[in-house]
Image: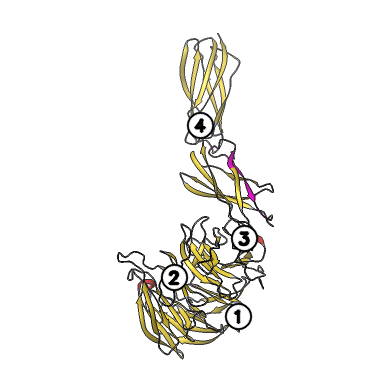
Amino acid sequence: MNTSRHYRRIAATLAALTLTTVGLTALAAPGAHAADGGAAGDTVAKLPIASYSALVVDSVHERVYVTDDRRDRSAGQVLVYNFAGQKVGSLPTGTAPSGMALSADSSRLYVSQSSGILVFDTLTQTRTGFTFTAYDVGCPRDVAFAGGKEWHTETPYYSDCDAQQSWLYGTSGTQSVNTGWNGAGRLRLTSGPEAPDRLVVAQTRSTTEPNPFLTTYDAGGDTLVRGPERRFADSDGHGALDVKDVAQSADGKRIAVADASYGTRLLDAADLSDAATAYQPLPEGATASAVSFSGDGKYLARGAAATGSTPDLLVQPADPADGTVPLEFAFDGVLDGDRVAPRGLGWSKDGSRLFAVTTNTYGNEYWLHVIQPPAAQYDSRFTGSLSTTPGQPVVGEPVGIRGRLELDGTAPAEPVRVSAVRHDANGDRKLAPVEVDPDGSFTVLDVPSLVGDATYTVSFTGDVTHRPAEDIALTVAVAKAPTTITLTVPAEASKADGLEITGKLTGQGRALPSGITLAVERTDRKGTGALTSAAVAADGTFRINDLPGATGEVTYTVSYAGDDLHTGSTASVTARVRR
């Protein structure tokens, strides 16, 4: 796998997580690129949507389907990608689509839109059927396939869709049939080949339902039969479910829930009780957003929303008792997204590819990642401490933050990069990533903008063969930029004719402010006294004209008091004054 080191962190080895590599060639195409330039294993495609709803993986035909979640009535489409991350087509839906489900044999794709459920042949990519829904409204529908039938939700409203009452419908021929089951807020449906007759329904949290339920239905007969139900809040109202995604294990015995309030819940499907062994918590600062088991039953992918180098994606053995440390990925870049979108994960059936939809912080841009996690990685570390060049950073002047990175194992095929963040009184600012020299040395460049303490934190987020290094930091005191005054005066002058002193004020860093005046003092045998201040021109020059009050040596001292970004400075010259 090739990674873009400026946005992805791979934090641990999965020595036991050796994925099948058959057919893993990832060919970059227009609209898709192999992250950081090149190799098979991680392809990223920018999705032409501004919202997102569902991801469906068809391993039989090697297709990935993506829909958006627009709540308007404009024309829409389902995006179709192949397993290499190339866009290979689209399915027109008339109005904006929302939910999708695949039949058990992968022959049919069901797509919901405002007026009904569309049916597409997955081999020919043509529409073959349509189910009329009870309502034609703007709220999106969830769709699932269980018990050999299609099921969908209905929210018969035009606004505030997540807080309204929703109903569960089945189908009979081309018509929808109300099952009689309903719940407040949006209902999320999950099904799949793991338990072909089981339909999982999760109620979303809303203002009308502060303690949502999770339940299952047996869809194998003519009538839905409800199984166990569970609500998660305690007697004080704490711990309520905030579901973002649900997945069933390959053997159908476990249900995993991405709960934004809790993390990853692992439940026994038979009664929805907590599994005897739970998964380890998500990294601190990560909020659960997605979960998916690989079709071969070996692996689990957990998606999250996190910032910076905190992982957004963990890939690990599906067995929670397996102590193998997860592989961790952190998405942090304008070309690849910042976090895993809710319900944004799906595996190929053989477990050789993981498909992940990422989004930016604002949730209005989306990317499709095709990931093959590496089988093994080596350690990396920063050695020694950071230093700066020059030793005393000043505001407005370039400073280099120097350090050294050490890598174990094989040398990477592509240049290694480190990134840095400056933290000062104005907050955090990301600096441009820089390449590491062959000997491990690097210099990150910055121009401090504030006087005072600034902390530079340098990160190596890993590459295809190396785990990330523990961050290293250095706090420096950024000083005001220095100023200099130069003066020129005649060696001799007459008391009667007076003299003229010329000079220039210069400063490093940012430009000096306009309207500067300089203090001027004259010292002679009669004592020291202040003269009229000197005005500095835009180019820094100034003139001082004086009629000396005494003969002999006369010294003129010119001073600048400084400003918010510049230090003060002083210069003196001496002239001999005759009668």
- Which residue is found at the position 60% from the left and 17% from the top? 490
Percent position (x, y) of residue 401?
59, 43
How much space separates mark 2 and mark 4, taking CA atoms?
A: 65 Å
Name the residue type under label 2: Ala
Region rendered in magenta: 385-409
SS of the residue under disc 1: loop
Q: Which residue is painted at 53% across and 35% down in the image? A: 481
The residue labelled by disc 1 is 60
Q: Earlier in the sequence, mark 1 or mark 3?
A: 3
Q: CA distance from mark 1 to mark 3?
A: 28 Å
| Marks 2, 1: nearer the viewer | 2
**Residue 173 x/y as whole percent:** 46, 91
Lower sequence index among marks 1 and 4: 1
**Residue labelled with disc 2:** 275
Does the segment drawn in magenta span residue 401?
A: yes
Amino acid type, mark 3 = Thr
Q: Quadrant of residue 214?
A: bottom left
Front-lying residue, 151 or 561: 151
Tell us which disc is closer to us: 3 or 2: 2
Q: Give SS at disc 3.
A: loop
Q: In this figure, which residue is indicated by the disc labeled 3? A: 3
Q: Please state the horizontal and vertical placement of residue 475, each as a whole percent of the image.
A: 51, 41
Residue ID for mark 4: 567
Lower sequence index among marks 3 and 2: 3
Dot placed on the residue nearer the N-terminal end, 2 or 4: 2
Task: Please name which of the two marks, 2 or 4, marks the residue nearer to the observer.
Answer: 2
Figure quadrant of the N terminus:
bottom right
